[in-house]
Image: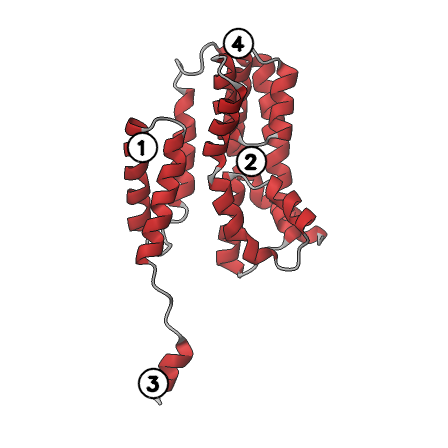
Amino acid sequence: MHKTHFWQGVRAGLVVALSTAPFGLLFGAVAVDGGVSPFEATMMSGIIFAGASQLVGVKLFGAHVPAWLVVLSVFAVNFRHILYSAALTPHLAGKSLPAKAGIFFFLTDPQFAEAMKRVDRSGRLETGWYLGVAAIIYVLWVASSALGALFGSLIGDPVALGVDVLLPVYFLGLVLGFRRRPLFGLVVPVSAAASILAMHLVGSPWHVSIGALAGILAALVFHRAPADPQQHGGEQH
């Protein structure tokens, strides 16, 4: 792993990591409020490392629903990570399966967004740079979760303070980061409409996966392969 790339990744991921810290605080507070100990909340962030599904999990734990339903609900929320890994796999050529598994452990929403921006800018994704971004996000996420679990009770009900609005605003910012990509103006409205409709017809958390699948189908239907420069060059001659 190239050390220079690693520290470049750390610097690139610092702002992103700081922006995720409020969600870590929120998760820690919500987890303890739902009956999870501060130690368990911190370990959950360190082992699972998937913010949105962690929130879903602790809420379901507090509702005393069957374990299989918790697992299934978390899978529904995390289904998008299957799509993320599929998109990144072409940029990990030559990596062994264990190496890919380790890389994909850190594949959160901001990690994917930063990785794809890196590919767009430089045409490649260095492993050292990727792990640098992952390291700073991971450390601050676990640390903020621990702080939220230990001191979250001091701020009272986070929902009453409107802290819960941070999550959708944050995801909106991630989505807008791809606004220059082809079909953005089509895929995002289709995905949003399908997700809202599914929320009313099927319920949470399935609307997340259904909205994602609707966006994928829209992209597949309306995708057009880029023109072949050699073909155009041949036509000019």
Is 214 in front, or is 21? 214
Label ID, residue 154:
4
Residue 149: x %, y % from top left: 58, 16
**Local crowd size for mark 3, using a 10 Å CA cut-off: few (<14), some (14–19), many (≥20):** few
- Rounded to the nearest angstrom, the CA distance separating label 3 from label 4 is 71 Å
The residue that disc 2 covers is: 17
Q: Do the residues labelled 3 and 1 touch (CB within 8 Å)?
A: no
Q: What element carries label 1?
A: helix
Residue 141: x %, y % from top left: 58, 30
Label ID, residue 198:
1
What amino acid is labelled 1 in the image?
Answer: Ala
The residue that disc 3 covers is: 235
**Local crowd size for mark 4, using a 10 Å CA cut-off: few (<14), some (14–19), many (≥20):** few
Residue 195: x %, y % from top left: 33, 35
Q: Which of marks 3 and 1 is nearer the N terminus?
A: 1
Outermost residue, bottom direction? 237
What amino acid is labelled 2 in the image?
Answer: Ala
Is 177 in front, or is 38? 38
Is 137 in front, or is 42? 42
Query: Residue 8 vs residue 215: left or right?
Result: right
